[in-house]
Amino acid sequence: MKISIPLLIAGCLMPVSFAAQAQGYPDRPITLVVPFAAGGSIDTTTRIIAENMRVTLGQPIIIENIGGAAGVIASTRVAKARPDGYTIMTGIWSTHVANGALYKQYDVQKDFEPVALMTSNPFLILSRNGLPADNLNGLIAWLKANPDKASQGTSGVGSANHLGGLYFQKATGTSFQFIPYRGLAPAMQDLVGGRIDIMFDSPSTSLPQVEGKTIKAYAVTAKKRLPAAPDIPTVDEAGLPGFYVSTWTALFAPKGTPQAIVKRLNDAAMAALADANVEARLAQVGQAIYPRDQQSPKALADLQAADIEKWWPIIKAANIKMQ
């Protein structure tokens, strides 16, 4: 078999080219894709962190919002992008865990390089004011006494709050209906109005209603209480130990991105997360920064793998069909 000289030379030079590219990285603006519309919590979180990262990297970071199809459109685009560090994305629990069991357009593990684990966002377990339960054990007892009669509002089939409800049913032996909405804002309106019974929602959007006493909060689905709501117990304290449900945000690059570039991006992300101003701004939107030793690419890969092992069986057992 004959091998052309130009092809052979190109093959030999490719590793050198990637090494040189990584050494001078970055030398132009970086596009950071957000898989949802502008103005939401993920977009806000990304912009707060990216604003600081650009200082460390010495280049502008252009935020590109690509919504639609539960993050599939954006994730597929980044998965197919050139692995040179100039197109990266904010991946979240739904795009890089749940979607792997629901869609086939991309592989949540094989198509990406983990870069940095950034923030976590647990849920609050909520109910309408008129529901006759004053604590989490009372809520569970009421649901068991009224099988299939209660309703949970969700932001759609396969959403994080929908899957959290499925996990809650499995953990508590309860059964209730799921009511999908176009978003959690209209679902919250119906919870406040007493037209649905329960919800699992982010503290950043639900705490104003809790503080206004228009809905009830039973527990936060995390190991620690929220600094913004210290009176709300954790699930461990409230009687459902180990029921941890938290979405996370992280940075991912296309598979094959040189490790030197991954490290450069990780260093910039970690520097941003260590900034007190960044931490304070993230806390205002309900995001908690992961400890420094959990911000590495390996820690992100390990968390993603553990969440896949935990959640895919729940998703597949529910026989969720995406349109």
Image (cartoon, rainbow, N blue to C red):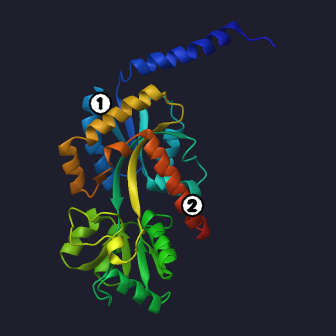
Q: Amino acid at mark 2?
A: Trp
Where on the picture, by quarter, is residue 133?
bottom left
Let me know if residue 299 appears in the view.
Answer: yes
Q: CA distance from mark 2 to mark 1?
A: 37 Å
Q: Residue furthest top?
A: 5
Question: Disc 1 marks which residue?
Answer: 60
In the displayed structure image, the side of residue 200 where residue 229 appears, left or right: left
Give the x, y percent position of residue 96: 49, 50
* Quarter of the image with the C terminus in it: bottom right
> Does residue 59 appear in this view?
no
Which disc number belongs to residue 288?
none
Marks 2 and 1 in Cβ contact (< 8 Å):
no
Q: Which residue is mark 2?
A: 312
Q: From this view, report whether residue 210 is shown above or below residue 8.
A: below
The amino acid type of the residue labelled 1 equals Pro
Residue at 27% across, 69% down: 206
Judge left or right: residue 105 versus residue 169: right
* Residue at the (57%, 60%) spot, across then down: 312
- Foreground of the two, 120 or 63: 120
- Dividing the picture into quadrants, the one containing residue 28 is top left
Element carrying mark 1: loop
- Viewer-closest of 241 and 149: 241
278 sits to left or right of 146: left
